[in-house]
Image (cartoon, grey):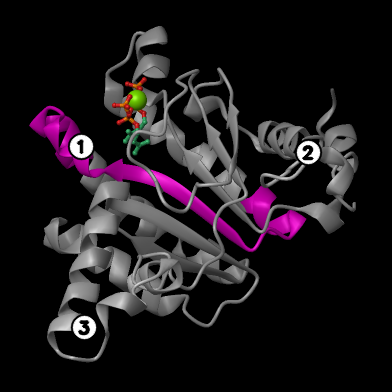
Amino acid sequence: MEKKDLKSQINTKKLPEHIAIIMDGNGRWAKEHGKPRVFGHRNGVTAVRETTEAAAELGVSYLTLYAFSTENWSRPKMEVSALMRLLVDTLVKELDTLNKNNIRLKAIGDLSKLPDRTRKALLDGIENTKDNERMTLVLALNYSGKWDLAQAAQKLGEEVAAGRLAPEDIDQEALAGQLSTKDMPDPELLIRTSGEARISNFLLWQLAYAELYFTPVFWPEFRKAHLYEAIIDYQNRERRFGKISEQLVS
Ligand code: IPE
Ligand code: IPE
Ligand code: MG
């Protein structure tokens, strides 16, 4: 279907407030084109730009992109350093566009382990866009869901040890309040590209009730129309949250 027709099928009053994406398939896409994996990562930037623009145009409030997992450090050294360099280059190049589009940049993950240049480019980008209000673009970098839960538990432990928190006051709200996503709503929609149907240690707690959408499209080929398709699919689902259909008021 035409992109315009797809967009017009979206009910903008029922948009997910937060969309999270596992951008997968760069390597396989490159291989299909007889190119090295890095070629796939470089072409993935176009998909990031398109998806960010489409989400902002629609009125989505938060877009979280899984850019590098804690497990991704196990890849060949050359690929890891190429990814870290690509991140710096992209952040520097796209900063103006983010500002022009009034988009705020944020990051989640253990940033202390990133190479200095990558961390600096990231922190500069965050600082330079902090007053933008149209949409928040969250990059998950050196992120893993288990890391997030462990670091939250550690912070709660420190609060207890300091006498500021009683163990019996540790409830879901207290834990969520220490997660790296503490100021954001949980994603209502998770998209994963490349045909894989797994979470790969992404937002484990936060995805508790997310609708999962898997598409065979490789990330470098993901465009606005693919995002529209995912949102339309999401809007056609019934989110029951444990209730039965008849209890839901639309
Ligand atoms: C996703 O594409 C990008 C990152 C994980 C950084 P992959 O690099 O995982 O591509 P495939 O899954 O090998 O095709
Ligand atoms: C998940 O993709 C991580 C990112 C997209 C950054 P992977 O390609 O690393 O996941 P697995 O290894 O196939 O589960
Ligand atoms: Mg992959």
Residue at the outermost front position: 168
Residue at the outermost left position: 77
Q: Is residue 219 above or below residue 7?
A: above
- Could one spot residue 144 in this view of the protein? no
Question: What residue is shown with label 3?
Answer: 159
How far is mark 3 from mark 2, CA to CA?
40 Å
Q: Who comes first in sequence, dot 3 or dot 1?
A: 1
Q: Which quarter holds ligand 2?
A: top left
Quadrant occupied by the N terminus: top right
Q: Is residue 151 above or below residue 155?
A: above
* Left or right for 33, reference 168: right
Disc 3 vs disc 2: Cβ atoms closer than 8 Å?
no
Residue 140 is situated, as x and y percent measured from the top left of the image, at 36, 52
How far is mark 1 from mark 2, CA to CA?
34 Å
- Could one spot residue 57 in this view of the protein? yes
Please rate how many residues cluster around mark 3, counting C-alpha atoms within 10 Å: few if below 14, some from 14 to 19, many from 20. Answer: some
Residue 75 is situated, as x and y percent measured from the top left of the image, at 16, 29
Residue 212 is situated, as x and y percent measured from the top left of the image, at 58, 34
Number of on-image labels? 3
* Left or right for 73, reference 243: left
Disc 1 Cβ-to-ligand 2 distance below 8 Å:
yes
As shown in the figure, which amino acid type bears the numbered disc 3? Glu
Tell which of 70 and 119 is nearer to you. 70
The numbered dot on residue 71 is 1
As shown in the figure, which amino acid type bears the numbered disc 2? Glu
The numbered dot on residue 238 is 2
| Residue in the image at 56% along x and 52% along y | 187
In the image, which is nearer the foreground, mark 3 or mark 1?
3
As shown in the figure, which amino acid type bears the numbered disc 1? Glu
Please report the bounds of the magenta region as a residue range. 53-82
| Residue in the image at 69% along x and 53% along y | 16
How far is mark 3 from mark 1, CA to CA?
29 Å
